Amino acid sequence: MIEKAKRECINCNLCTKHCSFLTKYNLNLKDYTSREDLKNECFMCDSCRHYCPKDLSGAEITKKFKSKSKNKFLIALSKDPYIFNNNSDKKSKTLLFLGCNYPKYYPETCEKLISICRDKDIDFSVECCRKPLYENGVAPTSKLDDLLKLKGTEKLICLCPNCYHTLKDNLSIEVISVYEFLKQENIGSTIMESADIFFPCSDKYNLEIFKYIKPFLHSYQDSFSDINCCGLGGGVLSKNKDIGNEIKSQILAKEKSCIYTYCSSCSHAFDKYGISNIKNILSEILGACEEPSSNTLKNSLYFKFKDSRR
């Protein structure tokens, strides 16, 4: 992608106009290929690719830069295999894939889903989709395909939009969102108040997941469309406080009473900014109505050793 950007960029600067990171440094993607020092400021949201007439990707450029970083070994240590994973060899044609973030931030919501699925003889998995590895140029050694083959799984239900969009094209089985599952099973309540929605990066342009969320919403507004990313993408939030503060200011300037999102990572980012009244759509329609938990280690350990498969 670095060579492609150098060769094919036409300097239209549409990427710059739609990216606060590129705007901050007055760069386009061609310029960015020579600024490896800025790799930790790219959100990896890939908004640039959506607008680029040459299909150039800032996320792919960043991934190449990060693949040379020593930090990628720390990510591999925690995610390959995921240190808080919880899988069984119980056969399950359909599998509830909790991911790694929902159990950390929304434990009660996960408990409700595990209970719903247990009654339908659907097992659960606490596991990483491998997206953090891919983003840092790390080739996973542990394979989800092996687990799914062991369990005889033919369909995966994903809570997290990142898991869904990462796995749907990388697995040989059917991958659906939890909202499609809930709609099929006629489970969940309608959110009656008008929802100001912050769309996650992975779904904001194709709305593959959101089309199954809409039936659960009485009305909604796309109130944050001019904000690239929550800041958690690419690890920006942990590495660049200035950009985090800028995103927080952009959100607060909207003067919305609450933020609805269907990404637990976005919810966590907003909580880290000190923004209150964050509503996760999955938690709301299931009646758990949780705020993102700050007891992430405790929650991760709880779900690692949870056994409710009898």
Image (tube, grey):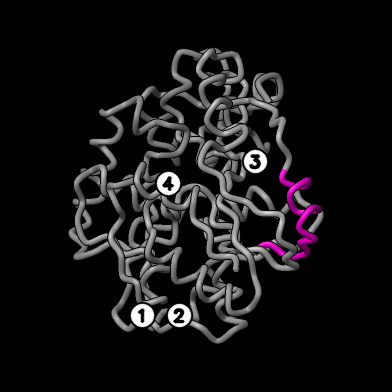
Q: Earlier in the sequence, mark 2 or mark 1?
A: 1
> What's the CA distance linking mark 2 and mark 1?
6 Å
Identity of the residue furthest to the bottom in this view: 186
Q: Residues within 10 Å of mark 4 (few under 14, many from 20)?
A: many
The reply to whether dot 4 and dot 1 touch (C-beta < 8 Å) is no
Q: Is residue 257 above or below residue 265?
A: below
Occupied quadrant, residue 2: top right
Most foreground residue, 213 or 226 = 213
Residue highlighted by disc 4 = 300
Disc 4 and disc 3: Cα gap in Å? 42 Å
Tell me which secondary structure the magenta stretch mostly adopts: helix
User: How many numbered markers are drawn?
Assistant: 4
The residue labelled by disc 3 is 53
Query: What residue sits 19% from the left and 56% below the top?
Result: 276
x, y percent for residue 26? 40, 24
Q: What is the three-letter code of the residue carrying label 2?
A: Phe
Looking at the figure, which quarter contains the N terminus?
A: top right
Marked residue nearer the N-terminal end (4 or 3): 3
* Viewer-nearest of discs 3 and 2: 2
Instruction: Report the magenta residues as a range.
Output: 144-156
Q: Amino acid at mark 3?
A: Pro
